[in-house]
Image: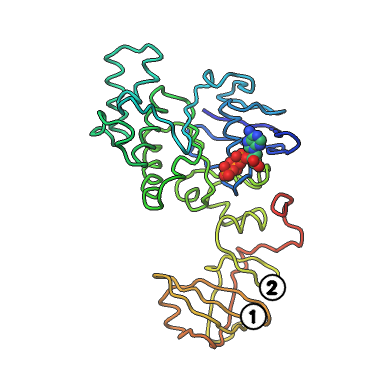
Amino acid sequence: MTIEVRNINKSFGDTPVLRDVSTTVESGSLTALLGPSGGGKSTLLRVIAGLEQPDSGTVRISGVDATRMAPQRRNVGFVFQHYAAFKHMTVFNNVAFGLQVRKRGKQEVRRRVTELLELVHLEQMANRYPAQLSGGQRQRMALARALAVEPEVLLLDEPFGALDAQVRKELRAWLRRLHDEVHVTTVFVTHDQEEAIEIADSIVVLANGVVEQAGSPHDIYDNPANPFVMRFLGPVTEIGGHLYRPHDIDLSIEPRAGSTVARVTRVVRLGFEVRVEMQIGEQEAWAQVTRGLAGRLGLKPGSTIHIMPSPDSRLRVEPETSPSATA
Ligand SMILES: Nc1ncnc2c1ncn2[C@@H]1O[C@H](COP(=O)(O)OP(=O)(O)OP(=O)(O)O)[C@@H](O)[C@H]1O
């Protein structure tokens, strides 16, 4: 179910929060809305859900103009960060709720809820109450509940945001697998670029109410549209007026055609990677190399090395970056 967002503008009072936002969410995709806090991600999600009315622009879901349609008529499921479960109802009844409201038969409800609890791996927890679940289990229950009514679109607002790093990682992998099984068009909000890169098919980078770039994780990481996106998606280092990914900097002991001389100031071992900090004239830069290479080159503070940044993956640092990045 394709979602087409066209020229959406939205202000709260005098503050523009979405500025001429257009993007297309492909049917069956898992799309991340990624960006810094306050950039408008939640507002855009709420506009798609119908919980917020745009000042101008349109939202089409499956080709139908949904801009003025009530949320319950859009056939979207919604999960927020702090999910409010019905505390007095068991997990089973929480998931069954939407089906019962829709007056589905008892047999059907039982079959569907059992299926969903298996899907989210909570079949053993059916008779517990929400307070007896861990945070991650509660979020999975929330997803089962959102999926119960077979939405065409699933909208997730930082669904794992409140959980600790380890649980968060598990749930992301799980969400990816779930999506591969269910294929419902899903849009999730995150400010975590690693989360977006790891699980999304497509990323929309939103900052200060503007879409900075949209594309596959691979494309956005390797071909960022501007310095803001490049910095937001991963580590960068600046050399001679260009931004590079630190793993795209090649190091050697001997000078080569086109190489630049640098002095190593610090060598930091981080598991299998080594972060090599250096001084190039007055400028500081760093490179990320493997432990093997650092060992072979015998890098230590004070070493002289020759660096060759890969010319393919650089981006010129403009004095003026994108308008939203500097605001
Ligand atoms: N109902 C509202 N009334 C007034 N201002 C609002 C309202 N909702 C959001 N805003 C403002 O709109 C801007 C964008 O908020 P939004 O929640 O969409 O951003 P976000 O990218 O989702 O940020 P976060 O990651 O922090 O949730 C913020 O400056 C916020 O304060």
Instruction: Give the number of the disc on residue 240.
Output: 2
Q: Is mark 1 within 8 Å of ligand 1?
A: no
Name the kind of residue labelled 2 in the image.
Gly
Looking at the image, can residue 22 be seen?
A: no
- x then y, percent, for residue 313: 60, 63
23, above or below 54, in the image: below
Instruction: Give the number of the disc on residue 280.
Output: 1
Q: Quadrant of residue 9?
A: top right
- x then y, percent, for residue 289: 48, 73
Name the kind of residue labelled 1 in the image.
Ile
- Picture quadrant of ligand 1: top right
Mark 1 lies on a secondary structure that is strand
Q: How many marks?
A: 2
163, above or below 232, in the image: above
**Contact flag, marks 1 and 2 (Cβ < 8 Å):** yes
- Could you classify mark 2 by the number of other residues whose Cα lies within 10 Å: few (under 14), some (14-19), or many (20 or more)? few
- Could you classify mark 1 by the number of other residues whose Cα lies within 10 Å: few (under 14), some (14-19), or many (20 or more)? some
Residue at (54, 73) in percent of width and height = 287
Looking at the image, can residue 326 be seen?
A: yes
Is 84 on the left or on the right of 134, as rendered? right
303, above or below 292, in the image: below
Is 146 on the left or on the right of 107, as rendered? right
Residue at (31, 33) in percent of width and height = 119
Q: Earlier in the sequence, mark 1 or mark 2?
A: 2
